[in-house]
Image (tube, helix red, strand yellow):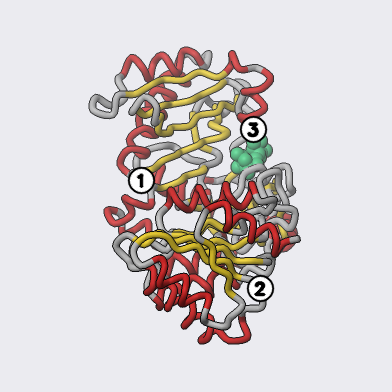
Amino acid sequence: MNIHEFQGKSILSQHGVRVQRGIIASTVEEAVKAAKDLNSQTGTNWFVIKAQVHAGGRGKGGGVKLAKNYDEVASLSSQILGMQLVTPQTSAEGKTVHQVLIAEDVYYPGESETSEFYMSVLLDRSQGRNMIMYSTEGGMDIETVAEQTPHLIFSESVDPMVGLLPFQARRIAFNLGLSGTAFKEMTQFVTALYQAYVQSDASLFEINPVLKTSDNKIMAVDAKVSLDDNALFRHKDFLEMRDTREENPIEVEAKEVGLNYVDLDGNVGCMVNGAGLAMATMDLIKQAGGEPANFLDVGGTADAARVETAFRIILKDPSVKAILINIFGGIVRCDRVAQGVVDAYKNLGDAIKIPIIVRLQGTNADIAKQLIDNSGLDVQSAVEFQEAADKVQAVLA
Ligand code: GDP
Ligand code: MN
């Protein structure tokens, strides 16, 4: 699960990571009030208005603006709230901005220069360890840094059983070229950041930029956080951070009914049991010259009700031009699935206007094939993988 910058910052702050302070607002009035409250809390007179959407690169898309008084807070907030924000990480339509974070300006002038760093904590699956990735090149996207100046990206591998050791925190601060107060601040920052990552069961904490202020404080100016869905049961307070407006509506609905559904760009809807078979089916569709419109694993119990639910979900995607049902009857008998397909088809009536190809293999596959063939519906059966692929190709032609 991904969360917003302001939510990520609140988790960080609870773990003692210094963050750029801010207050969330959904209307222009709230934005101005937030700025005034922030002024009384921090004394800041300049504010940054930051669009809250689940995508990076907001600055580039006009979603991060500096305001130097309350009138500017009002006018910039009214520009950003409700806008379709297009960034290098969104689709061409962009994302609707429902909330803005009114944050203190932390790039104020002072005795020394400000510097921006990059830092992320993530899981290194190949090593079975956590990893802290960091760079002196903050503020720009890390992919570009990786491409152009890979030697400026460092990493520190952390044994999850031992945790981040003090010498590692010092090495990080040293490699970032810090000294004095800023060095000490950085070791505290990275230690607290690592704690926040571990204790939240996160899969990613990406802070870009980490700022060294002109008075040598180290703080998180941005926060991109992904939480592990499988650990959410341990964090009831995180559940309310979910913003379904940021998620694909069909995926949200599929999740509610317990289907593993991932929306894709293609034209062939897939209904499959088992993730491995679902992957193989997607390959098959590609080979047949189509593009999968979704990944859908109906799971072990592919009964009539589930098949019908899966149909309803797949049909919500208007780009679907054909549906391929590929089910292996191991625990579930093929004839029951076939009956499910026939019943669902009848129940959905006019909703299905596209060809359906069904491949059922396993227990009672022959009875299942007869059921489909004798149903009189616009459903074609296939026995072999290749046959199914050919039939998909034929209906798309
Ligand atoms: P992103 O574009 O989605 O990654 O959003 P960020 O939160 O990283 O903000 C984008 C950029 O806005 C940062 O890299 C900073 O350069 C700038 N920025 C953020 N906060 C401040 C601030 O307090 N003052 C000023 N002047 N610039 C800021
Ligand atoms: Mn950023």
User: Is residue 360 shown above or below 109?
Assistant: below
What residue did someone put label 1 on? Answer: 14
- Residue on which the image places disc 2: 354
Figure quadrant of residue 293? bottom right
For label 3, the crowd category at 10 Å Cα-Cα, with few meaning under 14, some 14 to 19 and many 20 or more, is: some
Q: Reading the chain from its start, which is encountered first: label 1 or label 2?
A: 1
The amino acid sitting under disc 3 is: Asp
Between 203 and 391, the one lying in front of the other is 391
Question: How many discs mark residues in the rendered view?
Answer: 3
Q: Earlier in the sequence, mark 3 or mark 2?
A: 3
Q: Give the farthest residue toward the left.
A: 161
Q: Position of residue 335 (x, y in %)?
A: 38, 73
Element under label 3?
A: loop
Q: Quadrant of the C terminus?
A: bottom right
What is the CA distance from the residue labelled 1 to the residue labelled 2? 52 Å
Indicate the secondary structure of the residue bearing disc 1. Answer: helix
Q: Considering only vertical position in the picture, is 369 above or below 36?
A: below
Q: Are marks 1 and 2 in contact (CB under 8 Å)?
A: no
| Front residue (pair 295, 47) | 295
Q: Decide if ligand 1 comes within 8 Å of the CB at mark 3.
A: yes
First in residue order: circle 1 vs circle 3: 1
- Which tag is nearer the camera, tag 3 or tag 2? 2
| Residue that appears at 73% across and 47% down | 61
Asked whether, in this view, residue 91 is left or right of residue 311, the answer is right
Q: Position of residue 8 (x, y in %)?
A: 46, 47
| Horizontal side of residue 65 vs 195, given as left or right | right
Q: Residue at x 51, y 55 (%)?
A: 384
- Residue bearing mark 3: 141
Amino acid type assigned to the residue bearing label 2 in the image: Ile
